[in-house]
Amino acid sequence: VRRLISLLAVLAPVACRTVVDVPDAPPPWPVVEGLLTADSASTVFHLIWSSPPTAFPTDSRPIAADQVALELTGPAGRVRLTPVPDSAGYFRAALAIERGARYVLAGTIGGNPIRATTVVPARFDIVLPADTLVLTEGVATLVPFDWTAEGASAFYLRGARFRTNFGANGRATSGELLVEPPATPGNVTFEVSAITREADQYLFSPQFTPRSNVEGGFGYLGGAISVRRVIRWE
Amino acid sequence: MGVIRDLFALAVLGLLPSRPVQAQTTVRGVVVGSVGETPIPGARVAARRAGRTATTDDLGRFRLALGPLPDTLVITAIGWRPDTLAVGDLPAAPLRATLDRAPTVVSDLIVAADAGASLDLSVQERWVMSMEAARSVPPAVETDVYRSLALIPGVGFTSPFSARPMLRGYDAQEVATRIDGFEVLNLYHLGRVFSSFPADAAEQVSVVAAPGAAAEGGSVVGAIEIDGRSGWVDRFHAGGGLSLGSVGAYGGGGGAGLRYFGAVRTLHLKALDLLPDVSFPYHFEDLYGTAVVGPVDRPTGRVTLFASQDRVNPNQRKSLDWYNLMAGSRWRLLDRERATFEISGSAATFGERGAEVPSLHGAPTDFRNTFTHATTTAELDLLSPRSRIGLGIAVGWRQVENRVDPAAESGVIQTPTANTAVGRPEGAAWLDATHRIGRVALAAGLRADLAGSIVSLEPRLQLQWRLGRTTVLSAAAGRASRLYHLLSDARSEPDLDFFELWFVPNDTVPVARVDHATFDFQTRLARPLLLRVSAYLSRGHGIGEVRPESDQRYYAFEFVRFGRSRTWGIEAQLALRGGPDSPHSLSLSYAYARSERSWGGNWIRWAQDRRHQLRIFGQTRLGRIRLFGALDAATGMPLTPQVASVRSELPGDPLDPTSISRLGLRVYGAENSVGTSGTFRIDGGATLGFGGPTHDRFILGVSVINLLFGAVAPISDRGGGTFAVDRSGRPTTYRRLVDVPPIPTLTLRATF
């Protein structure tokens, strides 16, 4: 009995410890985020370093301009990413984005090779809603939608929400949108973007870890076609 | 050729009337309890002279081939005093062995009774647990048929409050459950903390690990079989129990031709505070009823009924209801020494309906699920002194409706969805042939499961080698399969998510098939020392699970995944017990287990994989007080590390900050690649019997779970328990799911 008690006395504090064999923290990775929107003349990229693991990330460290040597290549040519003035961590690629075209982002960040590719959606046709929506002021309204896209896997809304999940993104191609009246009366722009699978898997997986398509780093290079509608509140 | 000739002759002779043959004869009989003449299932009947054994079925019946008479039968059963029965001449009527109750000790879980040569190899890889033994272990709140399986080395749980029994490296969702031999689904109450089968209604619970005999189907890893109690002959008996969790009552009685038994259990709470800041009304009701038809010596049939229902927040917008209904009946149409023929039929349905119920990662969903099946089975069993043939066929229908939708008001982006409605015929056929040569019994079987256009062939081999009078070595190999998937979140604690995703195999969903090999060694080392060592190995395909949030390799909206499994392990159990009347016992078990999965890439540890597990159970008596203690220590489950975090941005114009939405993203490393410290707890309890002239009518029980305030829950990146540190003592972002203080339990049981 005495030996058993001694054994338990040893076991108990050892077993009660709460220890994790945490692996050594990896060095920060370059994070590249870029959405190539069809028909636009340039694209702004967001470049940051990854942070140590925390339950709720609240901060990010921008990548300095002198560490970035990236080029975006597409049908219209090849351009270098240049810093956006007074916006640390933002870089612009002045290259026309064409529908259905393939783009390659390649180069180095801090000397590390980086590469990502995407194909911009080829087509995005909106049957509903019409070009201009006229809604009753002060009343949240359900608006039917009906659209199709080629080369996209999800849709991202600004100015409305999907009724099925009350979120800004979804995969449905028809149904109803919930449009809420603005705080101040007037015309509001409603925008819907058809986005590629790479952007969808990275941006819209809040319950999962994002899936990266950037080799040598982390992040995404995706494509989109955005269409705008005007909502007039009367 | 001799084996084949024997088996062929058996097939012919088995159907003929038995004739008295002095050299080789077969007897039949029944083993019952001395009080009430209730059948004793799982009793071992050993012929001392012939050196052969048989095991009683769920109605206490046995058949045994003997050599020259006279012989003596030795009958042993867990929780009963051994007895002997002399067989002088060939008996004209079925034999009857009557056993008295004995103090049940936990060490009896090691089946090391006299090891005779048996033709019934279905007992291999089976652990039988009397509910009397289960009641002797300190319970959390109250005794539970699932949680009490912690006494069995191959069974594991995530915490003392989980009733999801994981078996030999596979999740509880892969383990089938049967009541009196009839399949049921999701036998859980709220939070899967309790099973919905009332413990007062159970005579014993068995765990059968795959592959088993060819008659075993419906699971890729094994089954839990609950045998219900029976009514006493010519005397009504009743009782009940009261605990902090529920109130229950039972009663039974009957006569020579019909015995009946029924039990109910209920709980009603006006406000259940299961989660912080969440309180809701909750109630459940359980019902079990059974009737055994026919004379005590040779019962011919049994009818079983089980029903349970749970209501969470009834009549409110956010609500959750579920129910279980099962009716089954089994009848022996032919009952001879050398041949039996049984038919059975059962129908069962499980249904659940939820509105805004927490689903994966707490996201609310609406769902409406029903899982229904009806099956008819016919089984023929032929027995000769050296051989045995079992034939069976089952036909049925299974209806699966699984509808899961995001709750309209959820405001979340991703929740699992399902819209399955499948009805299909199912069938199975099996053949088992067993032959004994000297001390070795070899069984070969083939099982075929059919569902729609899917066919699964499952060969089985079993071997039993009697090395000595009290030493048996057995081995088995074979394939087990299940033709549908029942997937729920194995990592549901402590969020208590409730959802089910059910699949039937098709072009994209594979059939679950697992190949097993097992080895089992039982011996009596010395008079009070018993040893059982088991080993197992498995390789599986088509194993499904809910995809963890850390899985980066697949499209995030694919909420389930299917892959391969491989497991192996060793279980050793050493028990010390006194004589039949001794209340002292000690059981020590150790299990080493490895369970891995491959989801299309490298092999990784299974999320619930625990490498080492040590359990000690002990009991003794001081006058009228019985004392019990238990120790459970296990290494930790693996963890998927967070290696980085990213403050991401949704697309927008960087010059217009109002257009940017920022997201905090967690980036995970290799799945289940990090080890965590284990769990440890010590439980203790005592019971006091009082109030009766001949036996105790009342038993008052007091127990405390987790006496030393040990760590009993796994470590995760969620939860609310103690924060973990790394090996150098630096703080991390991980923590115990919960910290559990010592939990006292008070129970009162009464019998009349």
Image (cartoon, rainbow, N blue to C red):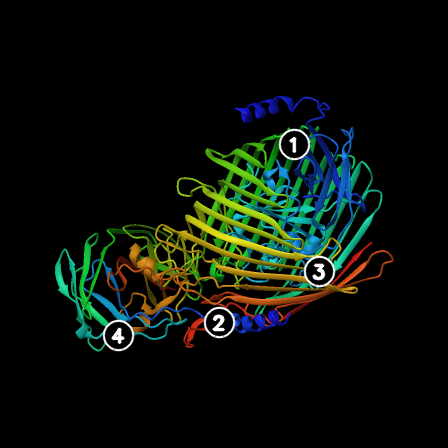
**Residue type for callout 2:** Thr
Residue B537 circle label? none
**Whole-percent x, y for residue B138 in the image:** 67, 63
> Quick one: label 1, few (<14), some, or many (20+) residues within 10 Å?
some
**Residue type for callout 3:** His
- For label 2, the residue is A18
> Pointer 1 and pointer 2: residues touching (CB < 8 Å)?
no
Q: Secondary structure at mark 4?
A: strand
Which chain does the residue under circle 4 lie in? A
Which chain does the residue under circle 2 lie in? A
**Whole-percent x, y for residue A136 in the image:** 42, 62
**Is label 1 on the same chain as label 3?**
yes
Q: Which residue is more in the foreground, B709 or B434?
A: B434
Tell me which residue sits at (39%, 65%) in the image: B641
CA distance for labels 4 and 2: 35 Å
CA distance for labels 1 and 3: 43 Å
Indicate which label's residue lies in the foreground, 4 or 3. Answer: 3
Q: Earlier in the sequence, mark 1 or mark 3?
A: 1
> Pointer 4 and pointer 3: residues touching (CB < 8 Å)?
no
- For label 3, the residue is B584
Indicate which label's residue lies in the foreground, 1 or 3. Answer: 3
Q: Which residue is more in the foreground, A157 or A196?
A: A196
Total numbered circles:
4
> Pointer 1 and pointer 4: residues touching (CB < 8 Å)?
no
- For label 4, the residue is A62
Q: Secondary structure at mark 2?
A: loop
**Residue type for callout 4:** Pro
Indicate which label's residue lies in the foreground, 1 or 2. Answer: 2
On screen, residue B254 above or below A224: above
**Whole-percent x, y for residue B96 in the image:** 77, 37
Tell me which residue sits at (47%, 46%) in the image: B419
CA distance for labels 3 and 2: 35 Å
